[in-house]
Amino acid sequence: MNGMTRAVLVLTAVLAWTQTGYQYYCTPSTDNDPSTCTPVKQIPLRWYRTEVPVQLDQALCADMTAQDAQVAIRQSLQTWNAEACTHPRLVDLGLVSGKAPIVRVKGGEVGNDLIIFQNTQAEWLADKAGVNVNNVIALTTLFFDPSTGEARSYALEMNDWQYDFALLEKQGVPGGAVDLENTLTHELGHVLALDHSENWESTMFLSAPQGEIAKRSLEEDDRTGLCSLYSEAYAEVNPDAEIGGGGDGCSSHPAGAPSVPLPLAPLLLALAALATGRLRGHRPGNP
């Protein structure tokens, strides 16, 4: 298998009016044209299992009670799981301790399928050499097989060092806090391998104004993107079955254990903060 790949996505702080349309991440194409993400020219990145494990670092968020943080996280999971079409379900495996978001294994790295809040500069900058994470609110790293597009693991890191997270009561509440559920719902879309949408009303739109909570719920564009990505047309060949071994099929794999023969390729998805900063994973500044 080819090595795993990482991609960085940044969400801008300015709300923009653009054309509508969901997008996918794709394996590299010979013409290097991201607009040609089709089964003919490129392979869309996606999971080939029915469940995607989600572990929560037990420290959770320093800005709110453990109960409130878990409520926000689990509501974000449920928002994606509630979509009726066929797609992987995000499965809450509960709290864990002492796990790094990304672990080094023989031949490369894998994600620990972990949501973690990083409260110090050292924690936030760790393992991010070469990537500008200044003012990035959250960073999602998706590890996949570049030869098949099969997603294998991920890490979802929250910048609790530079940003204050909260559960906002209504849209546009002043004070500079970032709504946790709003940010996580967007980030979990990246975990499911959705790219940014060009529809400014979508959960997967690349930016958000300060105090936004609109991304807590999915819009038609998000639903269409998710259902299309995991439709039968893309599921005709399961990479595990084609390659012969190395994958877990529809079962969850233990945290920290490589799910496929290495090397894999990491895809860094940078996200923007909903407040006044940026985040990495696919949103700079203001998700």
Image (cartoon, grey):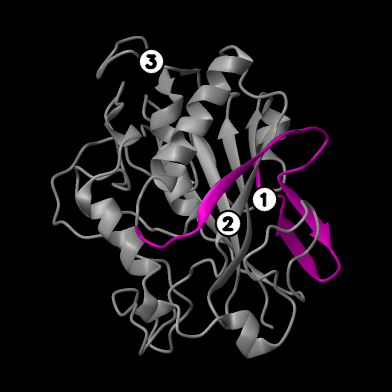
Q: Residue at x 59, y 54 (%)?
A: 52
Disc 2 marks which amino acid?
A: Glu
Judge by depth and name the residue closer to the eye, 228 or 256: 228
Tell me, for residue 129, which label it has, or none: 1
Task: Specify whether 158 is left or right of 87.
Answer: right
Residue 204 visible here: yes
Please identify the quarter of the rendering in which residue 207 is found. top left
Furthest residue in direction right, as rendered: 106
When the figure is inspected, residue 226 is found, relative to residue 185, above or below; the finding is below
Judge by depth and name the residue closer to the eye, 33 or 109: 109
When the figure is inspected, residue 131 is found, relative to residue 263, above or below; the finding is above
Judge by depth and name the residue closer to the eye, 19 or 233: 233
How far apart in space, not on screen, are marks 3 and 1 (Cα)?
A: 28 Å
Tell me, for residue 51, which label it has, or none: 2
In the image, which residues are magenta? 85-114
Judge by depth and name the residue closer to the eye, 205 or 219: 219
Q: Which residue is tagged 3?
A: 176
When the figure is inspected, residue 212 is found, relative to residue 185, above or below; the finding is above
Furthest residue in direction front, as rendered: 84
